[in-house]
Amino acid sequence: MGCATTTVKIASIIFNIILAIFAIGCIIGISFNPDAMREDIAIGAYIACSLIVFFAFLGCFAAIRESVCLTATCAVFLLVLAALQIALTCIGMSDTGVRSGVDTVNKAWEANAMDEIQREHECCGKVSPNDYITLNKAVPKSCYFDEDEANSLFHEGCKDKLQQYYDNESYFFAIASWSLVVFEIIGFLLALFLVINFRNTQRRMQF
């Protein structure tokens, strides 16, 4: 096997390991922020990242065994996953893909379930604490830092705060997703190079 092929083989193995670690990191990130994106997009991201992990390790095995069939399979699926990842990323970044903080807060307000949102995002009311005051309601303890009324009151409304949170998470999701696409395309090119060289090596060994 030529020096260039050996170098690419080692690079492919290392690259696939990095790709698998990165995909696992994305899975962990999504699991820690399950409400940051729409449920269907989150499920799609879970599935895509899980497949990336599987084919990354399969790519390592294929490169070590110098298997033309397995390496070609990994190359094809990495290209398909890259295409699916691009579609998923575009949907996730669209207006319909990003969750609506307004809708979430309105539903929580109608269900009298604002406490969790107010504690987690350090906000109060839909627009401001005045939402409670105008309805002659007591401002809940969840609107105060450490839920202690002696501490400062959160003056920012939950609609804006939650939408900002969703937008930020969507931004980080886009960065991670586009990074995976780049990794997948590079992995595809490395696998394609190995397939060609493995085939050439097998042909030379037949003579």
Image: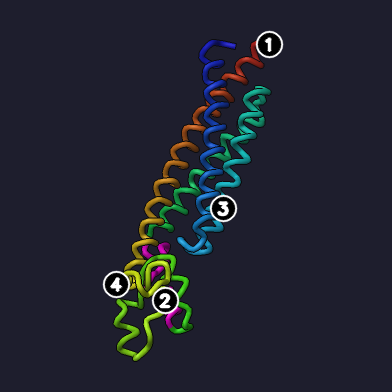
Q: Residue furthest front?
A: 150
Which tag, 3 or 1, sits closer to the chain's start?
Answer: 3
Q: Residue at x 68, y 11 (%)?
A: 205
Instruction: Give the mark nearer the N terminus: 3 vs 4.
Output: 3
Residue neighbourhood size for the residue with mark 4, other residues' Cα within 10 Å, grouped as few (<14), some (14–19), many (≥20)? some
**Bounds of the magenta segment:** 95-109
Amino acid type indicated by mark 2: Lys
Quadrant in the picture for the N terminus: top right
Residue highlighted by disc 1:
205
Q: Quadrant of residue 2?
A: top right
Helix, strand or loop status at disc 4 = loop
* Numbered circle sitting on residue 46: 3
Q: State yes or no: residue 105 in magenta.
A: yes
**Rendered image coloring scheme:** rainbow
Q: Nearer the viewer, residue 3 or 112?
A: 112
- Front-most of 181 and 149? 149
- Residue beneath disc 2: 141
Q: Earlier in the sequence, mark 4 or mark 1?
A: 4
Going from N to C along the chain, the mark reached first, 3 or 2, is: 3
- Label 1 crowd bin: few (<14), some (14–19), many (20+), radius 10 Å: few
Secondary structure predominantly adopted by residues drawn in magenta:
helix
Q: Residue at coordinates 34% horizontally, 91% vertically from top-left?
A: 136
On residue 183, the disc is: none
Q: Are marks 3 and 4 in contact (CB under 8 Å)?
A: no
Residue 54 horizontal/vertical position (percent): 63, 40
Residue under numbered circle 4? 155
Front tag of 3 and 2: 2
> Which residue is at a point 37% across and 81% down the rendered structure image?
139
- Tag in front: 3 or 1: 3
